[in-house]
Image (cartoon, helix red, strand yellow):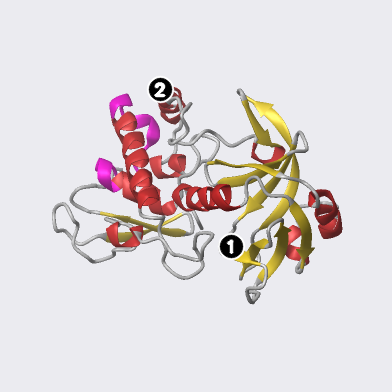
Amino acid sequence: MPELPEVEVVRRGVAEHVVGHIVESVLVKHPRSVRRHELGGDDLAARMTGLRVESACRRGKFLWLTFDEPDLALVVHLGMSGQMLVQPGDAPLEKHAHIIAGLDGGTQLRFVDQRTFGGWALNRLVAVDGDQLPESVAHIARDPLDPHFDTDAVVARMRAKSSEIKRVLLDQAVVSGIGNIYADEALWRAGIHGERTAAALTKPALRGLLGEVRAVMSAALDAGGTSFDALYVNVNGNSGYFERSLAAYGREDRPCRRCGAPIRREKFMNRSSFSCPRCQPKPRR
């Protein structure tokens, strides 16, 4: 699933090409893509039509648009394969284009989703810690690239957890935006095995780990995100290329870029973790 860098790349593209435009029409072609909007596709289309897009926002992995109607947001769930594409109105329609929003000027914002795990939903905006967030995003913590991210407060929350540090990194209520890829990359950079208990790590170690999270996601953002297939693309249909810079994730049996030991793959929460057996020794039981 896309993580913070990939969602931020999409947000920037939407901000550049969609913000300031008026939604002239909305066509919902697949009901699953609006299943999170309780009143259905017709209601979503009717309420969006005629609105001007004011901003494209993100917290962690969550993306939403605001309009010139106060307190209203369109929350975009990218799921595993959702794409937000900006296309000319006369461009051929993608096979899995499930929502098409026609904009003034003749362009279209298309939601393309092969696996239909994602979708659009209108939400009310609520005030949370000085920010306006959609109701469905209100419980999500700030991410490490947020200018108001409080490292010391997050370190304190992490040290209060008795679970594995990788599990804590993936907890969006503690720190948002981190998924399996960037958790493994940051842990490799910090030299910490994901099974270490969060509470057993020192404050300097946790601050350093969060610094590595910020560094690796910033580097991925500069590279346009991480693409393993054609399902993650930006609004112009282009893939990111950070995959070639990964040091741990997906590199089973390949040499560690730091010490040369073969990267190991281990099971973790119904997925895989990748780490260096030499640079990231497992905790003793």
Q: Residues within 10 Å of mark 1 (few under 14, many from 20)?
A: many
- Would you name the residue on which mark 1 appears? 85
Reading the chain from its start, which is encountered first: label 1 or label 2? 1
- State the quadrant of the C terminus: top left
Res. 57 mark: none
Q: Which residues are magenta?
A: 188-204
Residue found at x 68% / y 49%: 21
73 relative position to 183: left or right: right
Q: How many marks?
A: 2
The question of residue 191 being in magenta is answered with yes
Q: Is residue 136 positioned above or below 226 on the image?
A: above
What amino acid is at disc 1?
Leu
Q: Quadrant of residue 99?
A: bottom right
Cα distance in 3D space between marks 1 and 2: 38 Å
Residue found at x 65% / y 62%: 107
Task: Look at the image and tell me whether residue 51 can be seen.
Answer: yes
Q: Secondary structure at mark 1?
A: strand
- Would you name the residue on which mark 2 appears? 152
What amino acid is at disc 2?
Asp
Q: Is residue 57 positioned above or below 112 on the image?
A: above
